[in-house]
Image (tube, grey):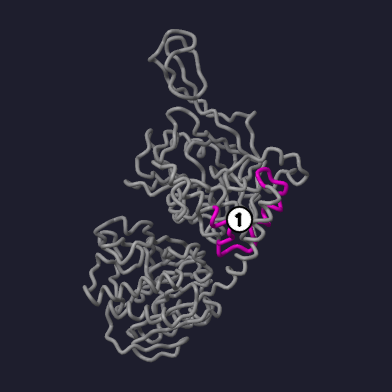
C-alpha cells in the first residue's frame, strides 16, 4: 500500500497532465496519484505510469463528490487533495508526512504559479499568461501566437495565512505572519484556500470528508477549517515545503463547471447555516472558540463575536441531546451459530446504544418485537418500519442479521436531517470458502439517518408496495431513486467507516451474491472491485471462515 494518495478532481483541466508530471518528478516517498476525470477525458492525455490511476465519469459528479470518490479508492495512510493546475516542491510528500499529526489538517506554503507565456511566433516577444493576445506589443502580428510553458512559482507572491470573514468568505490573513504565534516552521492557521490540503486518511473520514450536500464547488477551505478545528483538531501551515497554484484569472482558463450565482449563494448559505449555528453533530467547540483563538480577526467585529457566542450556547444544548440507536431485523433463516455471532458483535460494537430487534420468530435481543408474517421484501420493509416506530432515538442505524459490524461504523453521525447516509466500506465474505470481495455499493444494512426521515420514507414505502407491489425499479435503498420511480426525492450520500463491515454471504441471503464483474449488467455498480484473502482490520478469512468466526466470538477479531 502507498503511504500517500494525491487526489486530483479534474474537469476540463488543460493542465492536468502537466500537474501530474510535476508531481511524479518531485515525489520522494511511496506516493500515488488518483485523478478523477469528471465528465471528460483530459486533453492533452495522461501518460501511463504505475503510480497514476484515473477514474473516468462520462457525466460530471462535481468537485466534492470526485474528491470523496478518490479518497475512497485510497488505501494509503495519508491523502492530499490538490487542484489540477499546481506545481510542487522537491520531496514535498515526505516533508508533509513527517510533520502531520493524527488530528492535523496541513497545508504547504502557497506561491502563485507562473504557468505559461504567450510567444509571438513572428518576432519572439513573450507576454505573461493571460487572454490570447489579439496583437503583439512589438510587431503587427495578430494571429500567430503560441503558449510556452514556464511552470515556475512566483517567489514574490507567497501566502502562509488565511482566514474567513463574518460571512465565512475566504480571505487572506497576511498581517497574521507578524504575530508571535505565527512564527516557526509549523504554524496554526484559521482557514485555507481549498486548492491543496493534506491529512491522515482515517482523520478525513472521522470528519466526514467533504460534504457533497453543499454542492459541487465553493466553501471547501472554510469547511475543512471548521471541521478540523471544531472537532478538536487543528489546521496548520508547513513552511518547510510549498505548492504553487495557478489562479483562475487568466483568459481561456475559467471555471470548469457550469454553475450559477444562485448555486454559489446556496452553498454559502448552507455553510453559514451549518457553522454559524454550530449545527455540525461532531463539533466539540463552537465557532466562537475558533474566532477568539485568532482574535482580532479582520472582518469580524465585537458584535459579530457576541452574536455567534449566543448561537453556540443554544446550539450546543441542542446538539448534545441527539441520541443514537439501532433497528435490527431478521427473517430467522440464518444459521443459529452465525446469528448469535452477529448479535454478539453488534452488542460489543455499538457501545451500549439501544437496540430494537424485529423478527419473525421470538428472539432475545434488545427490545424485541415479533411479527407474524412470511419472509419477503414487503415483510422486510414492515419490520424496519415497526422498529423505527418503536425506537426513541434521534438517529438510527439499520442493522441486518448477517452483517458483522465494526465499532467504527457506529461512530458516524449524519450531518443533515434530510439525507440518507450509507457506509460503503463493506466487504462480502463467502461463508463456505472465506473468499473476500469489495466493491462500492449502497446497502440498506449500511444505512444511517435521522429517525424522522426514515419513518417518513418507510411509511410511504410500505403503503406503496402494499398498493402496487414491489419492483426493482423502485430500489431497496432509500434515496437512490427519485420520485416517481422511487418513493421520494430525498438524496443519499456515502461515507466510509475507518474499518469495514463484513457482509456474510450464505445460502439464505435475500439478495443474489455476485462474485464476477460480468454478472453486473451495468459496470458502474462494481466500481472499486477488489478480491483478497483477508479483510482490512479483521484478518484472513480465505479457507478459514469457521476459525475466523471463532475469533469474532472470542473478541479477538476485529484486530
Q: Is residue 288 magenta?
A: yes
Where residue 381 sits in the image (x, y, percent)? 32, 77
Residue drawn at 50 percent across, 77 percent down: 393
Residue drawn at 21 percent across, 73 percent down: 468
The total of numbered circles placed on residues is 1
Where residue 396 sits in the image (x, y, percent)? 46, 74
- The residue positioned farthest toward the left in the image shown: 468
| In the image, residue 137 above or below residue 326 | above
Where residue 407 sits in the image (x, y, percent)? 52, 72
Mark 1 = which residue?
Answer: 228
Left or right side of 315 for 47: left
Depth check: give the residue in front, 58 or 295. 295
- The residue positioned farthest toward the front in the image shown: 303
Residue drawn at 38 percent across, 33 percent down: 44
Q: Is residue 360 magenta?
A: no
- The residue positioned farthest toward the right in the image shown: 180
Report whether residue 33 is seen: no
| In the image, residue 300 above or below residue 547 | above
The magenta segment is 272-300
Left or right side of 98 for 270: left
Report whether residue 488 is seen: yes
Residue drawn at 30 percent across, 67 percent down: 487
Residue 15, by quadrant, is top left
Residue 290, by quadrant, is bottom right
Secondary structure under badge 1?
helix
Where residue 559 sits in the image (x, y, percent)? 53, 71
Q: Residues within 10 Å of mark 1 (few under 14, many from 20)?
A: many
- The residue positioned farthest toward the top in the image shown: 139
Amino acid at each position: 500500500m502507498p503511504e500517500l494518495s494525491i487526489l486530483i478532481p479534474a474537469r476540463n483541466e488543460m493542465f492536468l497532465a502537466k500537474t501530474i508530471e510535476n508531481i511524479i518528478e518531485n515525489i520522494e516517498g511511496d506516493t500515488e496519484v488518483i485523478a478523477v476525470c469528471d465528465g471528460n477525458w483530459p486533453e492533452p492525455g495522461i501518460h501511463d505510469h504505475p503510480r497514476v490511476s484515473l477514474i473516468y465519469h462520462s457525466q460530471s459528479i462535481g468537485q466534492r463528490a470526485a474528491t470523496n470518490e478518490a479518497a475512497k479508492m485510497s488505501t494509503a495512510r495519508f491523502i492530499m487533495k490538490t487542484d489540477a493546475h499546481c506545481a510542487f516542491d522537491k520531496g514535498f510528500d515526505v516533508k508533509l508526512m513527517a510533520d502531520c499529526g493524527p488530528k492535523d489538517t496541513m497545508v504547504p506554503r502557497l506561491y502563485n504559479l507562473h504557468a505559461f507565456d504567450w510567444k509571438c511566433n513572428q518576432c519572439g516577444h513573450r507576454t505573461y499568461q493571460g487572454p490570447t493576445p489579439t496583437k503583439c506589443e512589438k510587431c503587427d502580428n495578430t494571429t500567430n501566437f503560441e503558449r510556452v510553458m514556464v511552470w515556475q512559482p512566483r517567489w514574490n507572491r507567497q501566502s502562509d495565512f488565511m482566514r474567513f470573514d463574518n460571512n465565512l468568505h475566504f480571505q487572506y490573513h497576511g498581517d497574521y505572519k507578524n504575530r508571535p504565534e505565527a512564527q516557526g516552521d509549523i504554524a496554526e492557521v484559521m482557514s485555507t484556500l481549498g486548492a491543496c490540503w493534506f491529512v491522515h486518511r482515517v482523520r478525513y473520514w472521522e470528519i466526514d470528508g467533504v460534504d457533497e450536500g453543499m454542492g459541487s464547488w465553493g466553501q471547501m477551505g472554510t469547511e475543512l477549517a471548521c471541521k478540523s478545528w471544531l472537532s478538536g483538531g487543528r489546521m496548520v501551515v508547513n513552511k518547510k515545503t510549498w505548492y504553487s497554484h495557478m489562479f483562475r484569472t487568466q483568459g481561456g482558463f475559467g471555471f470548469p463547471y457550469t454553475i450559477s450565482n444562485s448555486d454559489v449563494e446556496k452553498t454559502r448559505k448552507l455553510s453559514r447555516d451549518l457553522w454559524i449555528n454550530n449545527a455540525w453533530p461532531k463539533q466539540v467547540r463552537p465557532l466562537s472558540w475558533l474566532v477568539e483563538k485568532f482574535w482580532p480577526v479582520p472582518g469580524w467585529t465585537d458584535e459579530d463575536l457576541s452574536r455567534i457566542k449566543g448561537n453556540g450556547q443554544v446550539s450546543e444544548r441542542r446538539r448534545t441531546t441527539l441520541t443514537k440507536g439501532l433497528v435490527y431485523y431478521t427473517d430467522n433463516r440464518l444459521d443459529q451459530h452465525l446469528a448469535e455471532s452477529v448479535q454478539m458483535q453488534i452488542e460489543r460494537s455499538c457501545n451500549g446504544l439501544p437496540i430494537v430487534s424485529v423478527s419473525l420468530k421470538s428472539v432475545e435481543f434488545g427490545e424485541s418485537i415479533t411479527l407474524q408474517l412470511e419472509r419477503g421484501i414487503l415483510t422486510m420493509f414492515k419490520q424496519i418500519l415497526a422498529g423505527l416506530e418503536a425506537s426513541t432515538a434521534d438517529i438510527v442505524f439499520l442493522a441486518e442479521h448477517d452483517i458483522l459490524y465494526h465499532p467504527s461504523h457506529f461512530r458516524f453521525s449524519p450531518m443533515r436531517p434530510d439525507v440518507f447516509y450509507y457506509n460503503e466500506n463493506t466487504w462480502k465474505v463467502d461463508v463456505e470458502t472465506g473468499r473476500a470481495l469489495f466493491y462500492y455499493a449502497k446497502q440498506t444494512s449500511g444505512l444511517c439517518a435521522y429517525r424522522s426521515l426514515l419513518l417518513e420514507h418507510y411509511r410511504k414505502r410500505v403503503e406503496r408496495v402494499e398498493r402496487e407491489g414491489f419492483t426493482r425499479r423502485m430500489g431497496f435503498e432509500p434515496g437512490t431513486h427519485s420520485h416517481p420511480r422511487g418513493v421520494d426525492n430525498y438524496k443519499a450520500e456515502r461515507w466510509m467507516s475507518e474499518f469495514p463491515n463484513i457482509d456474510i454471504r450464505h445460502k439464505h441471503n435475500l439478495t443474489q451474491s455476485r462474485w464476477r464483474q460480468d454478472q453486473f449488467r451495468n459496470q458502474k455498480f462494481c466500481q472499486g472491485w477488489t478480491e483478497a484473502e483477508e479483510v482490512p482490520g479483521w484478518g484472513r478469512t480465505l479457507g478459514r471462515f469457521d476459525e475466523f468466526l471463532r475469533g469474532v466470538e472470542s473478541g479477538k477479531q476485529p484486530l
